[in-house]
Amino acid sequence: ETGVTQTPRHLVMGMTNKKSLKCEQHLGHNAMYWYKQSAKKPLELMFVYSLEERVENNSVPSRFSPECPNSSHLFLHLHTLQPEDSALYLCASSHFGGSYNEQFFGPGTRLTVL
Amino acid sequence: GENVEQHPSTLSVQEGDSAVIKCTYSDSASNYFPWYKQELGKGPQLIIDIRSNVGEKKDQRIAVTLNKTAKHFSLHITETQPEDSAVYFCAARNTDKLIFGTGTRLQVFP
């Protein structure tokens, strides 16, 4: 595997379920990101991890809980979601620090909350 | 904070024609402006970027221009091909964060 991979690619869950999204990067980066992509809205940055420490939390509801066990893996734990949380969730990675570091995106997980 | 506006939201062109997408940003401290292409079922992929100390950059059929005074930057695609059809996002980097525009859906008709 190369680049940034995400699993699952599609997920349907009820509002009372608990599920997790997984992201893995094979690029030797030290920063990982979760974005939410909804129709006709800009990509919304949710969380940033640098060297496995969370450096940014953009006022995301507590029903989203990130976890970064090492620099290659990032999880997003989901519980008691709402239908408006349905979206494409994108993971990205980069070298942290400096002004010009390219972010590499995974293919995303299409989440539907019923 | 930074705010990025992108126009148009949709763009249809005939194969071989040029396409131009424009973005404006609000924070003069932003210094890096990447453009991403997102095809159906895939994540955004960087296609070209420009730094604030450069006014124009070209890579084959793709070029980006930056006007720091006016705080706007544009993506130019020449000799468009059907495989250029995708959603294009501009972004501005501000304090280690990328702030994205709302995207432009480009359709190139054969």
Image: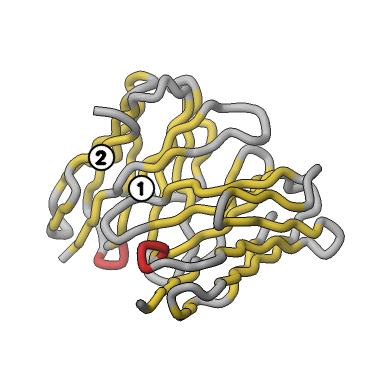
Chain under numbered label 2: A
As drawn, the residue found furthest toward the right would be B69
Number of numbered discs: 2
**Labelled pair 2, 1 in contact (Cβ < 8 Å):** yes
Q: Are marks 2 and 1 on the same chain?
A: yes
What residue appears at the point 68 percent right and 44 percent down from the top-left corner?
B32
Type of amino acid under label 1: Leu
Quadrant in which residue A111 is drawn: bottom left
Seen in the picture, residue B13 relative to B43 is either above or below; the reply is: below
Q: Residue A62 location in percent, x, y?
A: 36, 47
User: Residue at the location (24% across, 36% down)?
Assistant: A22
User: Which element is circle 1 on?
Assistant: strand
**Viewer-nearest residue: A86 or A14:** A86
B80 vs A49, nearest the viewer: B80
Q: Nearer the viewer, residue B90 or B107?
A: B107
Estimate how packed mark 1 is, as few (under 14), some (14 to 19) or many (20 or more) residues with alpha carbons within 10 Å. Answer: many
Q: CA distance from mark 2 to mark 1?
A: 8 Å
Q: Position of residue B43 (x, y in %)?
A: 35, 50
Horizontal side of B47 relative to A14 (left or right) equals right
Identify which residue is drawn at 27% across, 36% down: A5
Callout 2 amino acid: Gln
- In which quadrant will I find the N terminus of chain A? top left
Left or right of residue A77, residue B17 in this image: right
**Callout 2: few (<14), some (14-19), or many (20+) C-alpha neighbours within 10 Å?**
many
In this picture, is B105 found above or below A111?
Answer: below
- The residue identified by callout 2 is A6
Element marked by disc 2: strand
Instruction: Look at mark 1 in the image and give the residue it sits on.
Output: A90
Above or below: residue B7 compared with residue A29: below
